[in-house]
């Protein structure tokens, strides 16, 4: 299991993370361009060229990504696995079938569907979502656990177990950033989950600085044994 610092693109600016990566001379990261449209992603790809990053093994793809973007990441950064939201929730706008067998479907706001998982490589377990399901949506939690136990988990997201039920899907906003880590102890719930749920590659999905993410990774390595 490899836990990777991640360029997240939610409430925080990705440009600051690029500068940190340069300063820290990081060679390997995960990339979650979750909130970036293509023109902004192009700027991000260009900015990455100015860093020392050699490997991005794990990327969270968007439904509006074109095949050239995935090809670019594989050819230039040796990307091994992708994760995507359910195609029912966010259908691909372009033909990405070439990468289906290395793409894992994430548990998000709707129950995982076995028929869809079979078309892809398996499941990307977002453990913060899973923990919220355990607390607030137990029927969906039991359903998803059954599938997680049945199919390969190739990668995962780890973050805070905030109450995602407060998310306003119409306004697409939260009253506070659910991905901002205040205390490392907020991740202690992860000790309750089997290591097989984490997969080969783990993306730290918090909006904090890369330096804070590296502190988080050290903490996670201590508690996840």
Image (cartoon, helix red, strand yellow):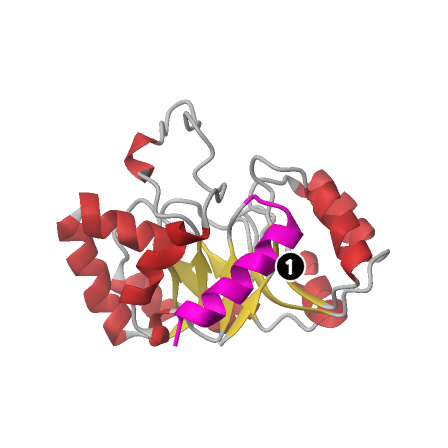
Residue 219 horizontal/vertical position (percent): 49, 63
Left-right relation of 133 to 197 = left
Classify mark 1: residues with Cα within 10 Å, few (<14), some (14-19) or many (20+): some
Vertically, is 124 above or below 207?
Answer: below
Residue 3 horizontal/vertical position (percent): 53, 68
Depth order, front residue of 78/192: 192
Residue 189 visible in the displayed image: yes
Depth order, front residue of 2/189: 189
The residue drawn where x is 69% and y is 73% is: 78
Depth order, front residue of 32/209: 209
The residue drawn where x is 44% and y is 27% is: 173
Snapshot quadrant of residue 142: bottom left
Most prominent secondary structure in the magenta stretch?
Answer: helix
Label 1, on which residue? 67
The residue drawn where x is 58% and y is 58% is: 215
The residue drawn where x is 19% and y is 67% is: 146
Which residue ends up furthest to the left in the rendered image? 139
Magenta span covers which residues?
A: 207-225
Which residue ends up furthest to the right in the rendered image? 50
Residue 212 is one of the magenta-drawn residues: yes
């Amino acid at each position: 299991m490899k836990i990777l610092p991640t360029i997240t693109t939610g409430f925080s600016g990705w440009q600051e993370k690029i500068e940190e990566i340069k300063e820290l001379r990081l060679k390997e990261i995960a990339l979650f361009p979750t909130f970036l449209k293509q023109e902004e992603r192009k700027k991000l790809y260009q900015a990455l060229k100015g860093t020392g990053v050699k490997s991005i093994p794990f990327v969270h793809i968007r439904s509006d990504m074109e095949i050239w973007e995935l090809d670019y990441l594989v050819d230039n950064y040796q990307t091994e696995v992708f994760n995507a939201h359910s195609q029912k929730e966010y259908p691909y706008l372009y033909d990405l079938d070439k990468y289906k067998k290395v793409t894992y479907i994430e548990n998000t706001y709707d129950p995982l569907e076995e028929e869809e998982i079979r078309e892809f490589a398996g499941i990307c377990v977002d453990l913060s979502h899973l923990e919220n399901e355990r607390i607030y949506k137990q029927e969906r939690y039991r359903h998803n656990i059954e599938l997680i136990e049945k199919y390969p988990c190739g990668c995962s997201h780890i973050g805070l177990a905030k109450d995602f039920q407060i998310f306003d899907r119409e306004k697409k906003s939260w009253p506070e950033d659910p991905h901002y880590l205040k205390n490392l102890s907020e991740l202690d719930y992860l000790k309750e989950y089997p290591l097989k749920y984490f997969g080969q590659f783990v993306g730290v999905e918090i909006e904090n600085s890369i330096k804070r993410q590296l502190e988080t990774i050290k903490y996670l390595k201590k508690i996840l044994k």
